[in-house]
Image (cartoon, rainbow, N blue to C red):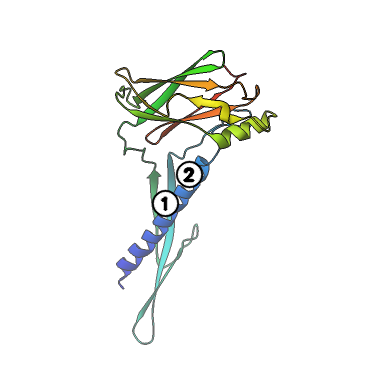
Amino acid sequence: MSEGNFIADTLESILVGMAESLREAQEELNSIAPLDGYGRPAPQYRIPHLDFEVGFQLTSETRTDGGIRLFFAPAKSGETSKEVTSRITGRFIAVPPGEGMPVPRLTAEIQSTGNRRTVTLAATTSAGEVLTGADIELNLDRDASLGLSAAAGVSSPRLSAVSLDRAVLQTDASGLAVAEVQLGGSLQTAAVVVLVAELGFETLRLVIGKEIA
């Protein structure tokens, strides 16, 4: 193997390893619950970019049989040597979903009438364009509802009393879609209900309840 190929293959392994570690770190940040124990939005974190500097030293030794042995090692700060020492700097940049193209966005308004909640969802893009005829899925997040209800002191919220008039909504010419949610009589008064609206990879969580307007 030539020195050039040896350096290229080694640097490739280092950069790929750094990229994988960066991806895993972002996935850990993504796993942070969107709501705290009281149903309030929790901070979310993103890594927009990562600057790096790789220093390396290449040493070649000629064996008695005429062969050449190569060593690749990190360079020490301030080191002076006859060996080849170099540094490479760069930046990993996070590429937004859609490779920089406008991506879906969801917002919601909730109106209360007794034990009925009217959820109005608005679908747009990150560029401000209205999404017409888009399908939005609306579901009850049972695990989150049970967890937040337990935090509110309700061990058995009776979520079966929650009903949605539609599970799939389609936006109109204004990019709006409306769903009715009924909080049945057997639902515990202090229960916390979490709904999840999904448009492609865009997810919006809504917190409602008899005591939550």
Q: Mark 2 sits on what residue?
A: 26
- Asked if 1 appears above or below 106 in the picture, the reply is below
**For the residues carrying marks 2 and 1, which lies nearer the camera in this image?**
2
Q: Dot 1: within a 10 Å radius of its alpha carbon, few (fewer than 14), some, or many (20 or more) residues? A: some
Give the image location of residue 82, x and y in percent. Answer: 41, 68
- The answer to whether 199 appears left or right of 159 in the picture is left
| SS type, badge 2 | helix
Q: Quadrant of residue 183?
A: top right
Q: Residue at x 29, y 18 (%)?
A: 173
Residue 39, quarter of the rendered image: top right
Q: Residue 43: x, y in percent?
A: 55, 32
Question: Which of disc 1 and disc 2 is earlier in sequence?
Answer: 1
Image quadrant holding the C terminus, namely top right
**Residue located beneath label 1 in the image:** 19
Horizontally, residue 159 falls left or right of residue 126, namely right
Q: Note whether 1 is above or below 136 in the view shown.
A: below
Q: Is residue 42 above or below residue 62?
A: above
Q: Which amino acid lies under the numbered mark 1 shown in the image of this protein?
A: Ala
**Total of numbered circles in the picture?**
2
Q: Position of residue 30 (x, y in %)?
A: 50, 40
Q: Residue furthest right?
A: 153
Question: What numbered label is drawn on residue 2?
Answer: none
Which quadrant of the view contains residue 184?
top right
Q: Position of residue 12 (x, y in %)?
A: 36, 59
Identified by mark 2, the residue type is Gln
- Identity of the residue drawn at 59% across and 22% down: 209
State the residue at coordinates (42%, 51%): 19
Quadrant of the rendering where the N terminus is positioned: bottom left
Q: Residue at x 51, y 18 (%)?
A: 117
Q: Which residue sits furthest bottom?
A: 65
CA gap, disc 2 to disc 1? Answer: 11 Å
